[in-house]
Amino acid sequence: MAIDRRYTSWSEGLLWKNISIAPLVSLRVLFGFLMAWSIIRFASKGWIEELYVKPQFFFTYYGFDWVQPWGASGMYVLFGLLLLSSLGILFGCFYRLSALSFFLLFTYVEFIDKTNYLNHYYFVSLFSFLLIWVPAHRRMSIDVWLKPSLALKDVPAWTVNMFKFQLGIVYVFAGLAKLNPDWLFRAMPLKLWLPSASDTAIIGPLLDYEWMAYLFSWSGALYDLTIVFFLLYKPTRWIAYTGVVLFHVMTAMLFQIGMFPWIMMCLTLIFFPAESHEAFWRRFGRWWQKGLDVAKGQTERIAYRSFIKTALLAYFLLQLLVPNRFLLYPGSLFWTEQGYRFSWRVMLMEKAGYTTFTVTDRMDQRKEWVDNNEFLTPQQEKMMSTQPDMILQYAHHLAEVYEKKGFNDPIVQCNSRVTLNGVRSQLFIDPEVDLSKQKRGFRHKEWILPQKKDQ
Amino acid sequence: MKSDNLLYFVFLFVAASLFVACDDDEGNTPSGPTGPTETLADARQDMAGHIADNFILPAYEQLATDFANLKTEADAFAANADEAGLNKVRAALKTAWLSWQDAAIYQMGPTSTNALRVALNTYPIDPELVESNVTSGTYTLGSLSNKGAEGFPAIDFLLNDGDVLPTLTGQDNNRMTYLTDLIDHMKEQIDLVNNEWKNGGFVTNFRAEVSNGTDVGSALGLIVNAIDLHFQRFLRDGKIAIPGGVRSAGVPRPTATEAFYGGYSVELLDRGLTAYFNLFKGEGINGTTENSLLAYLNRIEQEGISKDIESKFQQSLDKVAALSSPLSQQIEQDNDKVIEVFLSLQELVGLFKSDMASVMGVMITNQDTDGD
């Protein structure tokens, strides 16, 4: 009974204890700023054009074929709306609407083409989804400035803790994924990647040494697995945060991973106690106090509690299950990539390949070798070459195109060679199989040839 | 992988404590057989310098020299059109065209900013456009709409399409004027590009320390990507796949061969492929094999990949040698041999794109995108 009660009060505290709204305000401002910056960076590098306008074929997600780019001007409008939404989040202006539209638009863009899938884009989608549900705009915002009675001093703890849990999931799963023989005992793929960064300042020359790859692999795995716990534990928090900064600055220097390090460095600040955030925001004086005198405060609505509890439980159960779905498939995960995406498998493998296709007329056996450059951008070709679901999608597209060109019920076959983590390239897809007759979907793809490890 | 995650989890902590506990003395030399002589970044920088000094710059210098000679011969021929002069121009064309094969593989820097490849070697040409230019006497050389009537292939048409001596001297000399105009225009382009290679900032940056990484824009990144893209599009596809009908439902297009009128497409192909092979082996004008892609590969990967690439190059060259000239005739009579060359080149592309790029840590892409 005593333990039961202690658990109850612990979980009650985790969910319902009143804490300052300050951490939510910090999150809102940081996230809004980072996203606005990301979108401006994305546009200024010409990637809207490059990734969403130029390609003539897009690798949609199964079941989401209706997600299509909006054309050249449409895409710029879409990114303009995204920028507006992130500014809305940053300044707390029509916040709920901004968060909702950011989540929807961002996820839409990510779903246009698998080629551009990145774990940290998935993370941004989830994070913005969670932001929709919290009152992060009810202090230090334009919304409060317009309507002071909105101001809130305190929020229930779940609104902050669920972000910690989300960050915890990212790190721990990323750490678990590193516990594989290639990463630990062959220092792959870091053994291949580090020497190519040996032009980096200071540590550069060291990167040629093999032991550095082992050091980085092991300390990276340890970092991912444990950092969240050190951040949660008060005595180690500052050291842990210093570790966060060092780790992500290092990865930013060594690898081309864009905004991800900065996102993680900023958002892990949520692990600091509400009082620290409060102390920071208090400096803004008048702005921070705005509305508190007329605020109605939070009206406790106990009725919502069980709903919130259930929703949180469902969401995080899903978060725990999705990265493990690969267990349902036979074969090596890295090789087949069935269940690879949306699982926090970050920088885990060096995979490269070359996949070419032949299309044959089923009636008169006319045969053409497809020039991938005609249909795909180099980036799309590269991604397609090593990922079976993309190979299949592209094969179906080719069947359609060649049918229109006058090929009778075209047979589409591919020659695919793939190298994984420095093991010499080998045949990836059964070259005999007619891909035009294979169905898309979540079932195991029988036509992926098994990986021969000892080559 | 799979469910033994838990096992690794336990193992991690045991091994991590061992790892921290013992000060390891093993593995304290840079990976690869050459030992701790120089860092890989320095090796890449030396390679960039070697490629600039012994490949790119001399290739463009040679092209400029040979093309200047073509101009001299053509001017002499225009002044005094006889059979002997015509043969001299034809020979000079062939020499310059072969030199272009050595220079063409560096599709970057001044060559790509000036679109030299389009200006010099767009084929198949449009004979009707050439004829209408000759007849009208009005044309804008270097314009996009005229690119089907310019470059080496257009000169080839003017010099080698049947019995050309009477036509070149007839028609109020219009034809001869077009020929010399073409050559003058091309010479300007070549001299401009050669000059930019020699004196512009591109090479300085290419061989500088800032370019010694492997990312997009580094010297190695540029070379590997130029090899990848140009090899596929203009060597494999342009010289073999397209005329061989590989890209047109098996319907051969013999007139799409490179030197269709002169009939030495196979020699041009052989020279182009050899240029790549020499670049890979590092055999530049001074015959050195240090600082080559091959040596660099061997240093990071212990010879497996480089051996395969070497033998695939050799095999492809052998298959090219089995082709008879003119290529257009080979295509019409026995296209299987042409397809064989294509498939061999295709395998070579696969080795570049997967095995080589992967161990080198070079991204095959022209886009500077984020990863994770």
Image: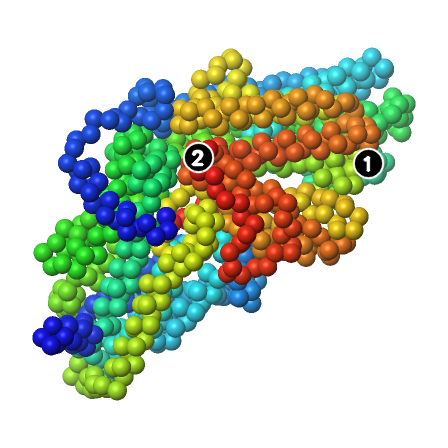
Residue B77 place in picture, x, y as percent: 80, 17
Callout 1 and callout 2 share a chain: no
Residue type marked 1: Pro
Residue A381 place in picture, x, y as percent: 55, 46
Residue B294 place in picture, x, y as percent: 48, 23
Please give the chain letter of the residue carrying mark 1: B
Q: Label 1 vs label 2: CA separation?
A: 56 Å
- Does residue A407 appear left or right of residue B204 in this picture? right
Please give the chain letter of the residue carrying mark 2: A
The residue tagged with tag 1: helix, strand or loop?
helix
Q: Residue at x 45, y 24 (%)?
A: B303
Which residue position holds label 2?
Answer: A454
Q: Residue at x 79, y 30 (%)?
A: B334
Specify few, some or many for label 1: CA neighbours under 10 Å numbering under 14, 14-19, or 20 or more. some
Residue B2 place in picture, x, y as percent: 37, 51
Badge 1 vs badge 2, beta-carbon distance below 8 Å: no
Which residue position holds label 1?
Answer: B127
Residue A53 visible in the picture: no
- Of residue A205 and residue A141, the one placed in the foreground of this image is A205
